Amino acid sequence: MAETLISTTARAFYDDDVVCLIDVLLRDKYLRDDDMAPRLSLPAKQLRRTLQFLEEEQLVKHELVDDLAMGGSQNTKFWYIDYNHTVHVIRLRIHLLQQKLQAAELRARSSSLYLCPGYNSKTCNGRYNETDAQQIVDPETGLFLCRECVRAYANHPNPPNKKDYTLKLVDNQKELKSAMDNMRRVRVQLSSKLDMQSQPLRQGIFDLLQKLRSIKGADPITSNLPSENISMGIGSKRIAGTGRTAGILLKKQQKQGIVSADGIGGVGGPGGAHNLGGGRRNDEDELTFLKNAIGQEIAFDLEKGGGARANLLATKGRIRNRLVDAAAMKVGVDL
C-alpha cells in the first residue's frame, strides 16, 4: 500500500525522470551510487542531481554501507526510499496544500480591494484593503479618498477633481473563481478515477492515505534500510566490474581459481572440480584477509608448517589426558 501511494504521488506531482527513478527504487529497493549509471544507462551526474533533488523533497534518503565483499567500498552510498518517512511527508504536504487552498478561497470571499484611479496610470500607489481605505472619507459624498493623493494635493493651487482620486471597489470575482477552480482541480487529481463501468482506473491519494491510516493491528511501515535488505538477501545485485575495489576482488577470485584470467568463471564452473576444495580456500582467505579495529584491511602469510604446530599445541593437552587415564585404568586407580 505504501509503495502504491508513493508511486501515485510521484505521477501526480513530478516529471517523468523522477517517476522513472522512483519506480526503479521501489522495484530494486535501493541503488548503489557507483553502479546506478550503467544499470540505468543514464549519466551518473544526471542521476545524482535527480536523487539529491528528491532527497531535498524528503522522498529519498541514502545510507552508507560497507560493501567491500561485493567490490564496493566501506562507505558505499546506497539510495533508497524510507517508506515510513515518505508516507508521513506525503500526508503532511497534502494537509498543507489543502490549508493553503482553503485560505486562498476564504481570503477571496471575505476581502475587498480598493484602488485609486491613479494606481492604474502609475501616478500613485493607492491600493488599500477595507481597513486602510476607511481612514480618509470625503465629508460631502461619504466616499473613500486616496491618502497619498490627498497629501499630494493638500497645498496644490489647482487640485484635480476629487473623482480623480476617489477609491473604487475592485471586483474580486476573478480571484474567487480562480481559488475555487484550484480547489476543484486538486480534489479531482487526488481522488480516484472511474471508467464508464464504474471500475477504478487509478487509485486516489486521498483513498490511499485513508487506507494506510485505518489499518488496525497491521505491522508498522518499514524503513526499507539497504543494510537490512542486504542481510536478508533482498534487492538488486551489483553489476560485475563496478565498484571502487572491483579490481582487487577480481584478483582475489583469480587467485582462488573462481574466475580465470579473462574474468570468466574458473575451470569446471560452479560446482566443478575447482570447487572441491572451495571450503578450505574460503577459510584460508578469511584467515589471511582481515580488518583491524578501524576497518583497514590487513594481509599476512602463514609460515610453512605453522598449521601443523598449531594443531599439535591444540591437541597436546587432550593426548596427555588420555595417556594418564589409560595408566590409571591399568593400575586400578580411579581418577
Image (cartoon, rainbow, N blue to C red):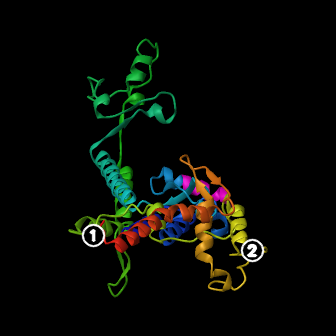
Question: Which residues fall within the magenta stretch?
Answer: 43-52
Residue name at image x 26 percent, y 28 percent? 142
Question: x and y percent of residue 8 in the render?
Answer: 42, 69
From where the camera sits, is residue 12 visible?
A: no
Residue 68 sits in quarter: bottom right
Label located before the other in sequence (1 or 2): 1
Residue 295 shown left or right of residue 229 in the figure: right
User: Residue 69 or 209: which is nearer the viewer?
Assistant: 69
Q: Marks 1/2: CA distance?
A: 51 Å
Residue 38 sits in quarter: bottom right
Residue assigned mark 2: 263
Residue 129 shown left or right of residue 238 in the figure: left
The answer to whether the residues at label 1 and label 2 have Cβ atoms under 8 Å apart is no
Residue 199 belongs to magenta span: no
Relative to 332, does residue 223 appear above or below in the rendering? above
Question: x and y percent of residue 152 in the render?
Answer: 44, 18
Q: How many other residues sit within 10 Å of disc 2, few (<14), some (14-19) or many (≥20)?
A: some
Residue assigned mark 1: 211
Residue 50 belongs to magenta span: yes
